[in-house]
Amino acid sequence: MKKLLLIICLSGLFVASIAADQEGESWARLYQRMPEIKQKYMIMQNIVPLNDTSLEPFLVSSLEELVYGELSQYRSARNTYDDWEILTRIIIGELGDIKARTASTVIWDVVITAEVPLLKAEGLIALGFIRAIEYAPEIAIILRDLNFNTRDDQNAAEIEAYGAVSALDKMKSDEGFESLFYASIGWYSDRITVYAEETLMSISDDPAPKLVEVMVEAPDYTDKRKALEFALKSTSPLAGKTLAAATALEEGLKYAEDDYQRLRELANLRIDAISALITLNTATPETPNLLDKAIKEGELDEKLIAIQALGGDGGDIATEILTRRLSEFNERQASGLAVNQEELILVKQLIYALGESGNVIGIQPLKEMSFVGFTPAVLRLADEAMAKINNN
């Protein structure tokens, strides 16, 4: 009995499938017989809901007729262009839905010649569904140019940008990575920027290396900071995030600025990078020396956080840097050149960082402090730091 019911059910599905195929073929024949483009559009509205993949050759040839054939005449006449555009758009949308790989060439021709943004966007979205990744480089260029915000009609530009982001989202191609990054921080509305960021983060499980590339090439310090921010909240493993933070610090130390605003942007980049290293609780082999440079060249807030990061590192190289810095203050104090208030803040931070390091290399300069004239309050901090090291 169960076998009989199963046979009946399968037979029903088979009959329904045949009926659906026959319906699609019937509508297709009727479409081909209709002379007027408005009539063709009305019939196509009955074909599209079927999502019949067997109609791919018919749909492709119908689109080719609109683009290259006799029906292309409707495209050149002002009074019939709208009819041509809406029919072309509905066919492209259906070809995308059924993932018609054979349609990619003609759809791309529509994209590069489209006169209205909705048609261009529909073509881009369809290419994404088809996964025509051979066009990813060109689509990335389309988005890159839109990111420059040179168009008078921003609403039209946004429509096209959405289509480009959607295509790159579906293709999952690295070709569009940089364009997606700048779209995510660009002039667009949240609808575009959020979508671009989501796409950027989903292209791979480890986007940090690509973000590092963007960071190094970015001309603005704020863009470099944004690349670091994205890397830190991405799905990249710890090694990738560490590389991003270390690269951001290196980029921040590479330049010098006279303009106050750019100087602050540069400082913020360095602070973000050092804060990330502290949070990640990791480092690259180059990190201690980069932090040492930050202590030498940065403002007070940068110096303090760099010292903190070296203390958190706790390795021999990091501790030797802290030791050398504290010894320099000891020598100044011993020579009679008392540290000023800002320098005293740095001395206290160095003491604290050496204690946090737990590294015995830091004991010697802490002991020396008792003989160079520091106040009892400072010496108590040194004693506490030495106790931490000894207990470690």
Image (spheres, rainbow, N blue to C red):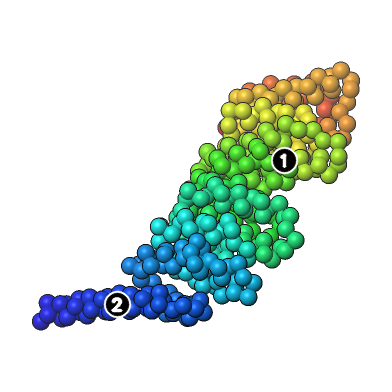
Towards the viewer: 281 or 143: 143
- Please give the name of the residue rendered at 72% of the width and 31% of the height, measured from the top-left corner: 254
State whether residue 258 is above or below residue 228.
above
Q: Secondary structure at mark 1?
A: loop
Q: Amino acid at mark 1?
A: Pro
In this view, which residue lies farthest toward the left?
A: 1
Towards the viewer: 241 or 165: 165
Q: Which x, y percent locates residue 264?
A: 80, 43
State whether residue 31 is above or below residue 376.
below
Q: From the image, tell me which residue sits under label 1.
A: 219
Q: Residues within 10 Å of mark 1 (few under 14, many from 20)?
A: few
Labelled pair 1, 2 in contact (Cβ < 8 Å): no
State which quadrant residue 371 falls in. top right
Which mark lies nearer to you, 1 or 2? 2
Q: Which x, y percent locates residue 364?
A: 69, 21
Residue 31 appears anywhere in the view: yes
Q: Which mark is residue 90?
A: none
Q: From the image, tell me which residue sits under label 2.
A: 22
Q: Amino acid at mark 2?
A: Gln
Q: Which x, y percent locates residue 192?
A: 63, 61
- Please give the name of the residue rendered at 61% of the width and 33% of the height, measured from the top-left corner: 313
- Please give the name of the residue rendered at 76% of the width and 33% of the height, measured from the top-left corner: 255
- Please give the name of the residue rendered at 40% of the width and 61% of the height, measured from the top-left corner: 100
208 horizontally vs 368: left or right: left
Towards the viewer: 102 or 138: 102
Residue 388 appears anywhere in the view: no
Q: CA distance from mark 1 to mark 2?
A: 59 Å
